[in-house]
Image (spheres, helix red, strand yellow):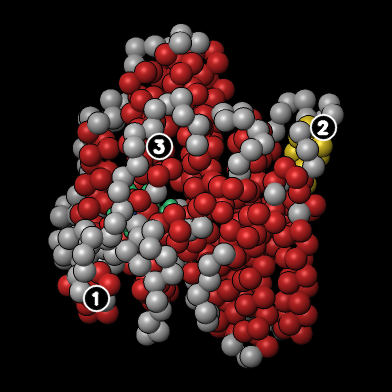
Amino acid sequence: MPVEPEVAVSYDELQSLPALFRAGSGGPGPGTRWQALRALLQATEVALLNLEELAAEATVRLRQGRGAEAVRSLEWMVGFGRAWSELAWLVRDLAPVDEDGGGHLLAVTASPSWHRLTLAEKELALELKPLADHPEPCEWKRRLLRYVMLQRIGVEYTCVGGAPSAYEDFVRPDAIREAVREKRLPGENLFTPFRAAHQMPELLARAANDHIGRAVEEIEGGRADRALPLLGRADRLLDAVVRLTDLLVDRLTTDEYHAIRKALGRTSGSHSVGLHYDLMRDLYPALARASQHRDEEIGLLARTIGLHIDRWRLAHVDLPRTNLGGAGTGTRSLTGSPDALRTVARMRETGRERDPYAHTGRTFCATDWDSDVPPLAEIERRLLGGIAGHTQERFQDVQERTGRYAGPSGFAPPPKRCPARPT
Ligand code: HEM
């Protein structure tokens, strides 16, 4: 296994969040429709940049006669195509009703990243052309047809009128490109897609947090009518954050994760200020408190936002499950949590215990790993035990906290975010 040096000492640095958020600074005010739209378009830029690299990788693999590996690149293209189409429908959904009444038209086809993607895909088309008329069914054909349909949706829907400035000025694709390309790992690996799976939700969560922060202020000021559209947009943005988990959950294999794990240092998504602290620790609880016994619509939207957090947690749990191993195996995470899967499950339960909207009458808990309610639970445990054994053997230093894993990580939780503070 290639042993990469760690590429960053903190989560923020690993995901290039300072550079990413610089691209989002200035411009539309916190909690506005255009802030939400810009976050969606910037997340789309991240997807386009990844697609360009994957298309180029597929082309090289085909040229080298590595057909099966080229299919793998196409599978990842389907993943990013899906992410793009999810973001794209939201662009249409959040578009202003009077979008044809003036202002600028923002179309993804104006993006330099779209232009570069078209060049990469034309190269790929040259390689695929001689194979396309081959009558036998091939793995790549189904992937390609799926990807192109997702791209069609993305191109049509990623278009919104009435914007305050033109595409490059508003979306700042070059700044996003800088952030996406800031860190790389040499060789063929999934480091860039792994970062994208963090960068896209971070962009959306940042805008959602500003919406929730402003909504809490409005609710506390007795202006429920003003809070409703803010919560409506936060709901949509967080729904997209949940859907983006599919990118890794559906695709990343244990080996692919293990191949980049050493480079991740002692970082963890649990160090995410936007997701773990601002949203989960501070803003949602503030919203849940403020919305109790008020307007019913506000209560319903607050509950939905809490549900998105829980849905996200249940989706995310599959990543430590399938990449590190089962509960009770004592498999440590990079940060040294003594049992990674139990840690994420406990984080979820703690969140639920503090959530006044959590359903108290549940008859089954999805993270009860010892339950035999799922008929395949015994097989599941065996498989997860196998992954745990393999992970512990492969990463003895992580497990035994030796070498670079000895000593504290130096991470300190950020101060509490009060609803009024924009990010
Ligand atoms: C292979 C991929 C991943 C693995 C193995 C993984 C693993 C973990 C683990 C073990 C924890 C518990 C804390 C710790 O011990 O460090 C955690 C927490 C967390 N991770 Fe991930 N993670 C992955 C991907 C992601 C992604 C893509 C995101 C999205 C930004 C993310 C965001 C978070 C957050 C926000 C928490 C705190 C959860 C909570 O408050 O309930 N992780 N992760």
Q: Kindly indicate the quadrant of the structure image that contains residue 75.
A: bottom right
Q: Hey, what amino acid is under mark 3?
A: Leu
Left or right placement of residue 185 versus residue 405 in this view:
right
Category of crowding for the residue at label 1, using alpha-carbon neighbours closer than 10 angstroms: few (below 14), some (14–19), many (at least 20)? few
Q: Secondary structure at mark 2?
A: loop
User: Where does residue 1 sit, x and y in percent of width and height?
Assistant: 37, 85
Q: Which residue is mark 2?
A: 103
Give the image quadrant in which the ligand numbered 1 is located: bottom left
Taking the image as drawn, is residue 54 in sight? yes
Report the mark closest to the observer, 1 or 3: 1
Mark with earlier residue (1, 3): 3
Q: Looking at the picture, tell me which residue is in the foreground, 400 or 389.
A: 400
Q: Are marks 1 and 3 in contact (CB under 8 Å)?
A: no
Q: Which mark is residue 279?
A: 3
Q: Which mark is residue 207?
A: none
Q: Which residue is mark 1?
A: 403
Q: Is mark 1 within 8 Å of ligand 1?
A: no
